Amino acid sequence: MTAPLRSGDPILVNVGLGTRAYDILIGRGLLASLGARVAARKPGSKAAIVTDETVARHHLAAAQAALQSAGIDATPIIVPAGESTKSFAMLERVCDALLAARIERDDLVVALGGGVVGDLAGFASAVARRGVDYVQVPTTLLAQVDSSVGGKTAINSSHGKNLVGAFYQPVLVLADTALLDTLPEREFRAGYAEVVKYGLLGDLEFFEWLEVNWRDVFAGGPARGNLAAPREYSVLKSVQAKAEIVARDEHEHGDRMLLNLGHTFGHAFEAAAGFSDKLLHGEAIGLGMALAFEFSARRDLMSKADADRVIRHLAIVGLPTKISDLRFGAPGIDRLMDLIAQDKKVKRGALTFILARGIGSAFVARDVDAEEIRTFLAEKLASR
Ligand code: NAD
Ligand code: GLY
């Protein structure tokens, strides 16, 4: 199986949302074209670049230069790196800075960073002056394949993750894969979990392609002859899958829930780790997907051999697939079930989970008995 794309050109995916449709461009070195692309869409506009301290060190100067080359003045707004930045305090700081920089409704916010910056800057754009356009320039693999697409923006509250936010679509996503060259390998691997997710939930062929080509995706090697390079191809396939789902179900009443494959188990472990670097979001999703496939096989929805195959791939790239892989003390079963119930309400003893009838055949199961989950997880905890 090969990647049927020509190298060189930026790859374009459109998110078909009518008057709020937008393009996602994928390619190496695209950041340099940011100014020209913004100027073409919004002539005469000013910009603010929201980024975090780490990304600023690596890529802010290039983003400012790209805007400046098209005559666009850009005010940098730099926030601390890390999940705790998705807070009310930082939202206030970013909104204040946007207003101080006189960013008007016909100006533009650039979210330059990973999912944290994208979620925060996107939400600030949604509420500042009741809505300023924003462009996503995702700098992590996770952000390129997931969080920059689809318009979910949010901050966290003391009640939980992403509980205050808005659906607010960007006007453009520029996924420059060269920006990933500075990303630590652990962060890249965590983002890869979301790439595998698209194969697992709806595309067996893509999963099979990843089984063969994952090393080249990690290595970021060059294009093969006339074909797109493996890393760009994996971003393209992910973004295409997400764009199609978002276009069908923007506000998550149906199919978009499939994107939560592995998230209910995963969020519980992420919360138990205090949303810290003891367990990155993507690592939690890796473990969550392994458990979701094992549980699906246990329910005789699919073969154990296929569940094992999924787990083997996640493990071979270095993602956690067992509770014993965690770098912190796993919570007890009562705490784990509490965390699961916080993530998904238990309705008459039943939970909604994303399960699978095979690799590439995920579905929304609304009738999962909470006791069945409890027994399954208690066994996993006991067998550590
Ligand atoms: P992140 O934004 O915290 O970035 C991870 C780390 O990498 C940070 O320390 C950051 O400073 C650093 N970094 C980013 N780009 C870099 C680069 N190019 N070079 C070097 N370092 C770089 O984390 P993330 O994994 O990108 O995103 C996780 C967040 O995304 C979570 O808050 C999660 O809830 C959210 N999310 C949102 C959606 C959505 O649809 N909106 C989807 C999935 C995840
Ligand atoms: N990451 C899940 C979604 O965008 O719906």
Image (spheres, grey):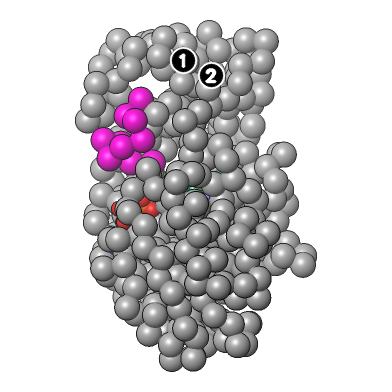
Circle 1: element type:
helix
Name the residue at 56% across, 37% down.
163
Where is 237 relative to 251, above or below?
below
| Residue 169 picture quarter | bottom right
Where is 356 relative to 244, above or below?
above
Residue furthest right in the image: 18
> Which label belongs to residue 85?
none
Name the residue at 60% across, 88% down.
44
Prevailing secondary structure class for the magenta stretch in the rendered image: loop
**Residue 216 visible in the picture:** no
From the viewer's perspective, tell me whether residue 17 is left or right of residue 166: right
**Of residues 16 and 119, which is closer to you in this image?**
119
* Residue 39: percent from left, percent from top: 57, 86
Question: Label 1 amino acid?
Answer: Met
Name the residue at 55% across, 12% down.
370
Callout 1–callout 2 Cβ contact below 8 Å: yes
Question: Label 2 amino acid?
Answer: Ala
Identify the residue position indicated by label 2 in the image: 341
Where is 74 relative to 286, above or below?
below
Q: CA distance from mark 1 to mark 2?
A: 6 Å
> Which label belongs to residue 337?
1
| 280 is within the stretch colored magenta | yes
Q: Within 10 Å of the Cα at label 2, are there few (<14), some (14-19), or many (20+) other Cα atoms?
A: some
Q: Which residues are magenta?
A: 272-281
